Structures are given as C-alpha cells and as structure tokens.
Amino acid sequence: MPPAPDAPRSPLIATHCPYCSLQCGMNLRARGTQSTDPAEVVEVVERPDFPVNRGALCGKGRTAPAVLSSRVRLTGPLVRRPATGRLEPATWEEALRLTAEGLRRTRAVHGADAVGVFGGGGLTNEKAYALGKFARIVLGTSQIDYNGRFCMSSAAAAHQRAFGLDRGLPFPLEDVPRTGCVLLVGSNLAETMPPALRYLTELRENGGKLIVVDPRRTRTAEQADLHLAPRPGTDLALALGLLHLVVAQGRTDEAFVRERTTGWEEARASAMAHWPELVERITGVGVPQLRAAVDMFCGAPTGMVLTARGPEQQSKGTDTVGAWINLVLATGKAGRPLSGYGCLTGQGNGQGGREHGQKADQLPGYRRLDDPAARTHVGRVWGVDPDTLPGPGRSAYELLDALGRDVKALLLMGSNPVVSAPRAAHVEARLGDLDFLAVADVVLSETAELADVVFPVTQWAEETGTTTNLEGRVLLRRRALAPPTEVRSDLEVLHGLAGLLGHGKGFPTDPEEVFEELRRASAGGPADYSGISYRRLEEEDGVFWPCPEPAGGTGTDGSAGGTAADGSAPGAVSEAHPGTPRLFLERFATPDGRARFVPVVHREAAEETDAEYPVVLTTGRVVAQYQSGAQTRRVAELNAAAPGPFVELHPRLAARLGVAEGQPVAVVSRRGRAVAPARVTDAIRPDTVFMPFHWAGGGRANTLTNPALDPTSRMPEFKVCAVRLEPLPAD
C-alpha cells in the first residue's frame, strides 16, 4: 500500500540507470509497501540536477526496477545434474566447488590457456578490474576478452592511432549544443540514447546545423538539416569523398595542420584518389549532397564529428573512423573548444570496462599488456612477478570461435553471446562443445541456459560500484536495497573461486576496497583514476579521467603522483585534481603532442552482394529493447512496445518479392536463416534490409551476420552482409 498522504517521504538514493553509456542519473525511493518483491519496493524518481540527462529517462530506465523482481531474475545457484541433464537448484558451496573443480581440472589436463574468461561491458569498473586480475593471477590464462569488443573497439583503435588516447568523447555532452555543426555518422540517438536527443534539438535551436549519415531515415535522421543515406559498408568512401572536396575547395585549415598534426601529405594524397563522382557511384550519395555537406560543415566556425556503431562495426571500421578523424583534423575542428571527434559508446560501462583489464591486450589504467613498464607497475600493485603475467590473448570472437577446441572451459560474466555474437548459431554450438561452462548473470539468459553452473548475481540497485560513461565521467552507483538471500555479487563469486583455487587474498568483496586498488593500478596510466575516490564521487556529479593523484599522493611507483594522459599537470599538493572534461586543447596525447593523420583508402566489405545474395543486411537496435534483450525482454511494458523482431524493407523491394506488410519473411545468409514479419517503409534504401538484434530463436538477426574481423580492432562486421529474402505464407 502507498504511504498515507501525511506520512514522511522516504529519502531519495541517487544512482544511475543500468543500461546505456549515458548512465543517466536517477533517484530511487522506497515505496513504503509491504511487498516482498524487490521490483515493488523501490520506484524511479527523476533526478533533474544530474547534468547528462537533466531528469529525462527513456522507457528502459523508468522500468529498470522490473528486472529486480524474483519472478524474472535468478534467485539461487543452478547446476546441471548428470542424471537429468537439466539445471537444478544448488547451494552456493556446491556451485563454487564444481566451478573451481572444472577450472582446475581443465588447467591440469590442457594448460592454463585452455581456460577462458569472457566479460561484459555492463560490469562495473570494480568487477571488470577484478575479473582481469582473476584471469591473469588465479587462472594464469591469456584467454580473456569481453563483449565490449563488439561495441566501439574500432573507434578506440582509431583514437589511439590519431590522438594517442582513447576516450569516447573528449568533451562533455554539454558542448554539443554550442558547436556550429554536428556530423553524426551511423547513430540513431532517438532510439539508442533517447535522453541525448535533446542535445541535437538544442543545437538546432541555437542555430547550429545537423548532418546525419545513415542508410535509414531514422527518427534521428528526421531531425537533420541534411541526411546522407550511403549504402551500408561505404562510409569510408563517403568520408574520403568529403575530404577530397575540402581539399579541392581550399577549405583546409593550413595553420592547424602545420602546427598541430603530422602525416597530412600522405592522407591528402589518399583522399584525392576518391573524387566525388567515384564516391557517388560507390555510396549512392549524390555529388550535390556531398557538396552541401562540405558547405555546411566547413561553413560553421566550430564543428564535431560523432560516430557510433554504423561505421565501426565493419571489417574496415578502424580505417573508416580514421577517415572521419582525418576530416576533423584537416578542417581544424579538433583540439579546440566546441570542436572535435567523438565516439558514442554503447554499453553502460563500455568505456570503463575496457580500461581496467578485461580486454585481451590491456592492463588496468588502459595500459598495454605487452609494455614491460606497465607489467612492472601492475605486478607491483598485485604483488606478483610481472614475468608471470600472461601475454595478450584472443579477441572476443576469436575466443568464442576457439571454444571446445583450444579453449575447453569458460567463465562468463555479464554477457549473452548466444544472441549478441556474430554467426551466433556457430557460437552457440561452440559453447555447447565446452567441457565446462560457468555463467554469472542476473537472469537465465540464452547463454546461461547452456551452462554447467549458473551464479545468480546482484543488480545495479543492489550493489555499490562505479561506471564510466561515454564522456569519460566516472560515476558512483549506490546500493538502494538488499538482494534476495541467495544472490551474491560478482565480486563474491570471484572471491569464493579464488579462495578455492589457492588465492585466499587479493580478491576482496567490498567494492570500495577494490576501487582503492584500481586507483593504485591505474596511477600514471592513460586512464588515470588515482585522484578519484568514493568520497569524492559522493560529493560530485562524476569526475572526468584522467584525474591523477596530486603530487605527494599515490603514483606509478606507489609514492608519487603522475601526469595526465593529455600532458596536463597533476595539480598542486594541497588540491585535488579537477579531472579533465576536455582533452587535447593544448596538445594531443602522442609523444610529440601532435595528432596523426593516417592515410586510408576505400575497400569493399568482406562480403558483397551477388546473384545468390542480392540484398545488404544491416542490424541495429530499437528504443524499447537493449542489447541482447536478456533483461528488457522480461519487462512487460517494453515487450508491449517492441514484442519481437522484424525485417524492414523498402516498398520497391517488397513489391518485387511480393511481400506484404506483416508477412513472414525468411532472411538467408551464408551462415544461416532468420524469419520475422516484414515492415515495409520508404525510410530505408531499396537495396538494404534492416533487422534489430535483440531476440533469440528463429528471428535471431545475428544468425546471419558475418564474423569477418577488422585487422586492427578485431571488430566483427555486424553492419554489412549479403542476404536473400524468401517470402513465406502468411499463416
């Protein structure tokens, strides 16, 4: 029952949404009910003082407490019983013992690298840090990666090449409405991050211009002053064509290029090989539109290019993002106030998740695993000989592809690759071939259903921990209620397994204690968190990294403060470092302080259309579901809005195939077949179809997608593959 009108209101607990990388601020308040269902105990209340979303929430954020319900979540450990072959209830002691035995047995028979670890971009910084440490110290394996590899790894690689540092946005979102022009590439903010759409609305209200690049006329594209709709997989040619026109029209910023960059001559030569008429033939974007885009972008005194999964989830994603960065550099719209290039990170902690060690080639603080100095520093913090730390392992898809062959056992936390991985039916088969699989999750996902042991773990409202949003803003989520009795945190899972595997110390269960160690491990690294503390995060609306400890604090050797990754000073002894909301204003994070142009050339997608597979498939999200849908598909309100998959196709393509609205259609690629009802719309190119990827079963879009990998980032080519469509009877 609700409290009486004159009863005192329960205090608000400030926290953050568990879904996308905006990490919208929200408040939780106890309802005053006698219910024992956690979903009914708390309600979401707006938090208008948090600067990122200013109180706005999408449907996923508003309904987030629904997943806390014991009716939809895991409430106790499960183990697969040999007698029945089914997952059945077990005690924590049994689940931990069976997992430790499975991991130990695999190591003894096949070696340390036969044990794999797969993490998630939704894990807090503390969990991601502990998982990477567990893999490298307790298991001694190099075989660890995470699903964030599928999110923005191409942009991260391009950031590193051009700027020497990877942070999704080098400026806060509040700068976006104040710039002169935003060129948004492959992002549908209206559906993926609805509260962020206001920044584009305010941009236009302030007189700024918006250019959207997307093969579909999405709700975001409808807001644009100019919409460019290239054929999927041709974004690289489009960026090169725009740069060609910038050069040909004499609109490069020669002073900026000369004073703050290197490599321009080679990059310019590669762009000049992509003349407008050639780019029109490749992309389908007319030359007049190309010229209009250049006029709009170069005509503004300030400007930003923002990319998302569209250009990144390609087998040439790193070069594609690099081409857009070259455009920003050539026009002098980088390293200056209200200008720059940024990537819209997708997953809730996609930024922090890759900074602290669950990625195959990295150590905490965004240090390189193959850097001897980094290994020495982290080894000292962990109390181990750096020579005992394994080297870089396989990337995410390569790790999944090796399951059941080189990798015999897997510990998986916070991911659902049965739905989210490319060539998903193959990945599902690989998971089934493992000798042992343990999964920690909040729900019984499609991947957890295959496990030998399933650990039920705490959710966002039941635990304290930090995340890092797309701006590089480190945030504190606060515990609001206790979890069910038989649910424990991921940190407790790792603590229990480490103890059974001979490491009784070094894996605390208190998240603040883990964060304090993370601070020391990150000190002096590119992603330096050493100047950030829980106490500080409780008092501020997040702190932007790099934020080194002031001189006299904890530094790279455990005794002295470091230098920020962008070259700024660490701050005075008596004052906390303010954090770094805006990067690169004085210098880039390269050894010489200059940004690097990287010459790139257009190349075709790994799989082009042909007579047998004549249509391009691209995939994406819808507003009411999130990622693999493991959580959002359990929320009635969200399912009512988006109940299942669909195939979006143009009326001309539908007429040619004889497909009517709502008719089931089989979409067939070289990897498999998915069936979903047709959604006929002129908002998509006639040579392209679109499917959302949130669902399992017969409508699983990732059954079709191509695992061809970018050579640098190892990102799979989710956004482009060749398919054919087969109309099915309406019944």
Image (spheres, rainbow, N blue to C red):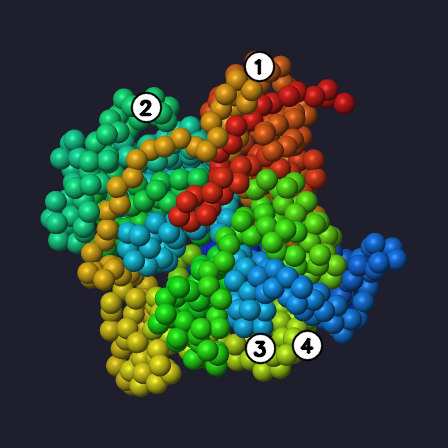
Say which quarter of the image contains residue 545.
bottom left
As drawn, the residue found furthest toward the right would be: 83
Q: Earlier in the sequence, mark 1 or mark 4?
A: 4
Tell me if mark 1 has few (under 14), some (14-19) or many (20+) residues whose alpha carbon lies within 10 angstroms of its own: few
Instruction: Please tell me whether residue 532 is drawn above or below residue 675 in the rendered image.
Output: below
Disc 2 is placed on an element classified as helix
Give the residue pinned by disc 2: 280
Disc 3 is placed on an element classified as loop
Residue type of the residue flagged with mark 2: Glu
In the shown orientation, is residue 402 left or right of residue 698?
A: left
Q: Earlier in the sequence, mark 4 or mark 3?
A: 4
Q: Cα distance, mark 1 to mark 4?
A: 63 Å
Mark whose residue sits in front, 3 or 2 = 3
In the shown orientation, is residue 249 left or right of residue 128?
A: left
Give the residue pinned by disc 1: 655
Q: Cα distance, mark 1 to mark 3?
A: 61 Å
In the shown orientation, is residue 591 left or right of residue 94?
A: left
